[in-house]
Image (spheres, rainbow, N blue to C red):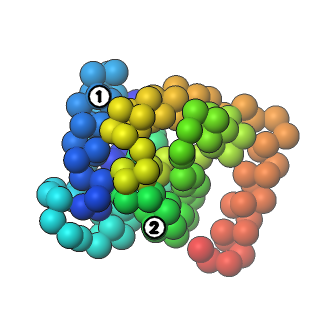
Amino acid sequence: MRVAIASDHAGFAAKELLKVYLAGLGHAVEDFGCSSAESCDYPDFIAPAAEAVAAGKCERGIVLGGSGNGEAMAANKVPGIRAAVVTDDFTAEMARRHNDANVASFGARVLSAERIQRLAAIFLDTSFEGGRHVRRIEKIAALEKRRGT
């Protein structure tokens, strides 16, 4: 799977480890930055990663920051993105199975790098269940079109 990845300075170290881990699982990883632990503004890196997912250039995205909240908010401003803050096995699985999330957001100040790797693998390995959840995803898309966000 082709995976877009991006972080801010707080998520940089975990992102670098995650890239190696995902490549070891056979994923093609495209890194949208940042490129160091020096303070930076996360929307500058998260938006291009989310845009690559929305355009179909990457099948999924993973973004990282201190808490993961701002990164999810930035990614969700890109039409077609459904980014979920993932904190445990259940949220990793349900983000995909029920919400068809295409971007996972992780807090590197909340979770260890090893935990992020495990949760990223669950997120990437889980399929969308479809069924009754399709109509809900369609309603989210309709809101996005109506509100222009």
Quarter of the image with the C terminus in it = bottom right
Judge whether residue 95 can be spotted in this image: yes
Judge whether residue 32 can be spotted in this image: no
Q: Residues within 10 Å of mark 1 (few under 14, many from 20)?
A: some
Q: Secondary structure at mark 2?
A: helix
Q: Is residue 84 above or below residue 17?
A: below
Question: Where residue 129 sits in the image (x, y, percent)?
Answer: 72, 31
Q: Residues within 10 Å of mark 2 (few under 14, many from 20)?
A: many
Based on the displayed image, in which of its 4 quarters is residue 98 positioned?
top right
Residue sitting nearer the eye, 58 or 6: 6
Amino acid type at image mark 1? Tyr
| Total count of labels | 2
Disc 2: which residue = 70
Q: Residue furthest bottom?
A: 147
Question: Where residue 66 sits in the image (x, y, percent)?
Answer: 37, 59
Residue sitting nearer the eye, 85 or 2: 85
Based on the displayed image, in which of its 4 quarters is residue 141 positioned?
bottom right
Disc 1: which residue = 21
Q: Residue at x 75, y 54 (%)?
A: 138
Q: Residue furthest top?
A: 25
Q: Residue at x 62, y 29 (%)?
A: 127
Based on the displayed image, in which of its 4 quarters is residue 80 positioned?
bottom right
Question: Where residue 12 sits in the image (x, y, percent)?
Answer: 24, 52
Amino acid type at image mark 2? Gly
* 141 to the left or right of 31: right
Closer to the chain start, of discs 2 and 1, is 1
Q: Residue at x 82, y 35 (%)?
A: 131
Q: CA distance from mark 2 to mark 1?
A: 24 Å
